Image (cartoon, rainbow, N blue to C red):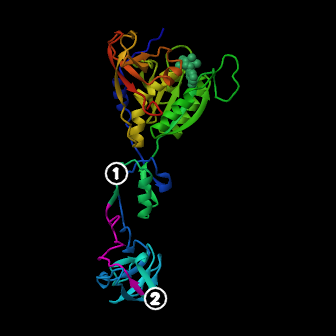
Amino acid sequence: MAELGVISLEEAKAALDKFWKPKPRDVYVSFSHAIGRVSSTEIKSKIDVPPFDRATYDGFAVKASDTFGATESSPIKLKLVGRVLAGTWPRMHLRPGSSVEITTGAPLPRGADAVVMSEYAVVEDGSVNIYRSVSPWENVTSRGSDIKKGQIVIGRLKQLNLLDVAVLAAIGVKKIMVKDRPKVAVISTGSELVEPGAKLRKGKIYDVNATSLSESVRACGGEPVFLGTISDRFSAIKAAVSNGIKIADVVLISGGSSVGTGDLTPRAIATLGRPGVIVHGIAMKPGKPTFIAVVKNKPIFGLPGYPVSALMVFDQLVADYLHELSGIPRSRQSVVQAKLATKLLSARGRQEFVPVKLVEKDGQKLAEPILKGSGAITSLSTADGYIEVPLEREIVEEGESVEVKLFRGCSLV
Ligand code: AMP
Ligand code: MG
């Protein structure tokens, strides 16, 4: 029987490194599509914001010194010489002893240096009585006080949120250069698979990986392109992968990745071009029957069909590359110390990832291994995280201290 020539996860990554390196691309997007994306360059404002000195409130533009001494009992009378509305540009030049009615956001006329709020002013026969003095620049928002021309408003490689987009709007920028989302072709293989929603006939199961891998791609900032649930036929696999290489930056194909008679995926890909399959077999559990190929300078990750294996391999092998391509930083993985609840036997010579549930017992944190196996998607959905058992360990004793790596938010990645 053919055997997989296993190498460690690190060796597998180093092997891929020789043939392919992730190269992020830049793309312009409208700011309405910029949220969540990562800026390719720093953004400098080309204007002052606000672009002119403006009234902070409705009231009367004045020369502050004209109002000195004004109080409720002894108001100062100023000549009312006009009105400035927001959105217009004042032509007048305010002379001493005069005032102009002004609305919030309207430009301050030349000669004025403050605004008396309308609450402290009463208009009377072409004049305005001022009941409170103002100091210079009171109730005025000065030009560039929010953003100065030339100021950097967004740094390079910043993941943009809604406030960043609001700042872009304030400086009048509609398009911004961001890291492009890598396109990732997702292919499921297996003659037993049917798409969720379809009728389940005898001998068939629903395709899980199409969904779990596509969503994992999205969580890394990639754009999944699902190319279908393909039956175990050499020509069908070849056609789907060829198409994937054409339209995507990365291809993910699950199922049929081992060396059994029914495992056609690596063999089909081997006919597509050089260097072809460069890694076949990784010393991890789950995930041993994983392969990596490179064809036409595109990486193809061949993941095992078992849903838990496929997700674990995605998490350990694929996710970092997609984060590098999309520029979106991978969130830090939280780690919790716990005591192993039951003795664990592990495969020698393989780095094992065991899903665990965290429980509190007598004030102690316990990690309960979920041993449903990699065919059971619920072994992940009911787990809080996983523990890693190194290559050479065979037994982890009950009560031993273990590091639980928590799943990150809504996704494994
Ligand atoms: P394979 O890697 O093709 O040998 O498949 C291993 C196991 O995973 C088999 O029981 C398959 O039926 C199952 N499997 C393969 N692909 C999927 C999938 N996309 N969704 C759910 N189960 C799958
Ligand atoms: Mg199969």
Give SS at disc 2: strand
Where is residue 260 drawn, in percent x and y? Answer: 52, 13
Question: Could you say whether the residue bearing mark 1 is in a helix, strand or loop?
Answer: loop
Residue holding disc 2: 124
Identify the amino acid type marked 2: Glu
The label on residue 156 is 1
- Residue sitting at 42 percent across and 72 percent down? 57
Q: Quadrant of the C terminus?
A: top left
Q: Which residues are magenta?
A: 128-151
Q: Give left or right: position of 118 versus 337.
A: right
Count of marks overlaid on the render:
2
Assign ligand 1 to one image quadrant. Answer: top right
Of residue 397 and residue 179, the one placed in the foreground of this image is: 397
Q: Residue, x 47% and y 76% (percent of image)?
A: 87
In the image: residue 23, left or right of residue 198: left
Q: Is residue 240 above or below residue 351?
A: below
